[in-house]
Amino acid sequence: MPLTDTKIKALKPKAKPYKVSDFDGLYVNVTPNGSRLWRFKFRHEGKEGLLSFGGYPATGLKDARRLRDDARALLAKGINPSAEKAEAKAVAAGKAENSFNKFADLFVQKARKEGRAKVTIKKMEWLLDDARADFGDMPIAEITPQIVLKTLRKREKLEQYETAKRMRSRIGGVFRYAVASGQAENDPTFALKDALIRPTVTHRAAITDEETLKRFLTALDNYGGKRMTVIALRLLMLFALRPSELRKARWDEFDLEARVFNVPAERMKMRRPHAVPLTDLALELLKELKALTGWGDLLFPAQTSAHKPMSENTLNQALRRMGFGPDEATSHGFRSTFSTFANESGLWNPDAIEAYSSRQDKNAVRRAYNRSQYWEERVKIAEWWAGRLVDLSDG
């Protein structure tokens, strides 16, 4: 007679496994430990086969009969249900193997092998966190633009428009990596290019006129804070570097005899090494700084640890104490200060000016073919810029 839930619940374990049939090949296998397991016995092409449908009560009586009926329908079509189940399992395993999380991991590993800075890797992982949480376990080939957009909209609701933009870019990088690996057909973030709210671009404040620069240099001459901070700001202006490229400088990167500061590629935004000419003024400042911090590896160690560089906040706080608000001057803005004065002088090749401050040419074709370093002209620019700053600060 067919099974009922009451009969199944009443089944007791014995010393050896035993079977209790339902009908059409379905039965319950009762084990010595009390488990009640669904089995379906069938024949295909003259050979006996067996399917497992899980255990009772996780798989109920109705579900077990439905699974049996599905298997019998396949048999009626000449299909082996065991082979079909194995294939479906393999497909599911393959999808899990090619999840978004897998390619996100590979994408981050690639960035590490390329020598990206630790802070860059950390930011990359942070930008991928939301995507991992929302669709990380999904097969990457099945993720649609709408699925990605739903994740990005969460940031937009918080008015974090720039974050949403950067997230789209990083998520797109993962998809393009998967496309190149042959596990995805397209990058769904491409379709979202015009779907996100465009963030308002806020440029870092920079001193770009002569009178304000004179006022700043006077304030710097009279600054009552730490001498190391003053030297850092002076060298930042002379070198036209990004703050992080100077703050993390080490003494072994300076060749004083050759008069060059070699910034390693891993610290440069463009991921290529950069050489900075050292003028007489720069050498004087370095000599003074050597007496202050030459006992360690870093030019500008933090106050709390000799093994960590000073923070960019230290430089910006000094600017505030000198009376320059965040809308008037920032440590990052001194590259623009140099670029403005150098270009307005009309004395130098624009490409040499860009090379001096390690800016990337926006013209991709010209960037690819224009490989000149303009070193001799950059040395002249360095001397000119140092002299200009001295003149503006009344010597």
Image (cartoon, rainbow, N blue to C red):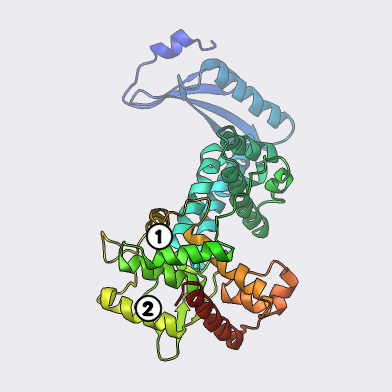
Distance CA(mark 2)–CA(mark 1) = 17 Å
Which numbered dot is residue 285? 2
Along the horizontal axis of the image, is 386 left or right of 76?
left
Picture quadrant where residue 345 is located = bottom right
Q: Is residue 165 above or below residue 177?
A: above
Which numbered dot is residue 50? none
Q: Secondary structure at mark 1?
A: helix
Along the horizontal axis of the image, is 195 left or right of 390?
right
- Seen as rendered, the residue at the extreme front is 394
Q: Specify few, some or many for label 1: CA neighbours under 10 Å numbering under 14, 14-19, or 20 or more.
A: some
User: Residue 373: x percent and y percent?
Assistant: 61, 83
Label located before the other in sequence (2 or 1) = 2
Q: Is residue 25 above or below residue 168?
A: above
Check disc 2 and give the amino acid type.
Leu
User: Residue 309: x percent and y percent?
Assistant: 35, 64
- Seen as rendered, the residue at the extreme bottom is 257
Check disc 1 and give the amino acid type.
Leu
Foreground residue among 84 and 117: 117
Q: Secondary structure at mark 2?
A: helix
Residue drawn at x 26%, y 62% as measured from the top left: 305
Foreground residue among 212 and 318: 212
Residue drawn at x 37%, y 58% as measured from the top left: 314
User: Residue 310: x percent and y percent?
Assistant: 35, 62
Q: Is residue 67 above or below residue 204?
A: above
Residue bearing mark 1: 315
Residue drawn at x 59%, y 45% as measured from the top left: 162
Asked if the residue under mark 1 is in contact with the one under mark 2, i.e. CB atoms within 8 Å, the reply is no
User: Residue 336: x percent and y percent?
Assistant: 58, 64
Q: Is residue 116 visible?
A: no
Picture quadrant where residue 395 is located = bottom left
